[in-house]
Image (cartoon, grey):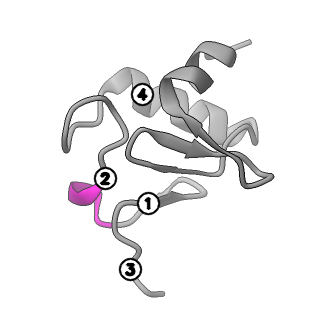
């Protein structure tokens, strides 16, 4: 499989050092990581790049907005 830098597809991390899914460069905070894994299991999101997450229908949405819309566990 070709490496896709900066993306998380279906929960599989490729080049973790290149991923920046939080609000500071090259840092994955525990709350964002927990939220993304929960949202992926719920099929709310499929992928993440930078501060953007991608829904199953291909819509790109800002990470903070999705975390607000879909709090963990609800």
Q: Which residues are magenta?
A: 15-19
Q: Is residue 23 left or right of residue 37?
A: left
In this image, 60 relative to 51: left or right? right
Residue 19 — which label?
2
- Apparent side of residue 50 relative to residue 64 in the rendered image (left or right): left
6 inside magenta stretch = no
Look at the image and say whether residue 18 sits in the magenta stretch.
yes
Q: Secondary structure at mark 4?
A: helix
At label 3, counting other C-alpha atoms closer than 10 Å, the crowd grade (few under 14, some 14-19, many 20 or more) is few
| Residue 41 image point, x, y percent | 69, 40
Quarter of the figure that contains the C terminus? top right
Q: Which residue is mark 3?
A: 3
Residue 52 percent location from the top left of the image: 49, 42
Which mark identifies residue 7?
A: 1
Query: Label 3's element?
Result: loop
Q: Is residue 30 above or below residue 17?
A: above
Q: Residue 3: name its quadrant.
A: bottom left
Q: Secondary structure at mark 2?
A: loop
First in sequence: mark 4 vs mark 1: 1
Predominant secondary structure in magenta?
helix
Residue found 54% across the figure and 53% down from its top? 11
**Residue 17: % across, % down:** 20, 56
Label 3 to label 1, Cα distance in Å?
Answer: 9 Å
Q: Does any portion of residue 47 appear in the rendered image?
A: yes
Query: Tag 2 or tag 1, which sits nearer the N-term?
Result: 1
From mark 4 to mark 1, how far is it between C-alphas? Answer: 15 Å
Say if mark 1 contacts mark 2, CB within 8 Å.
yes
Which one is earlier in the sequence, the residue at label 4 or at label 2? Answer: 2
Q: Which residue is mark 4?
A: 32
> What's the distance in space between the residues labelled 3 and 2, CA to CA?
12 Å
């Amino acid at each position: 499989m070709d490496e896709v830098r900066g993306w998380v597809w279906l929960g599989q991390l490729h080049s973790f050092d290149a991923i920046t899914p939080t609000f500071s460069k090259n840092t994955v905070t525990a709350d964002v990581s927990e939220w993304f894994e929960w949202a992926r299991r719920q099929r709310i999101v499929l992928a993440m790049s930078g501060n953007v997450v991608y829904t199953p229908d291909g819509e790109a949405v800002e990470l903070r907005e999705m975390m607000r819309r879909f709090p963990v566990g609800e």
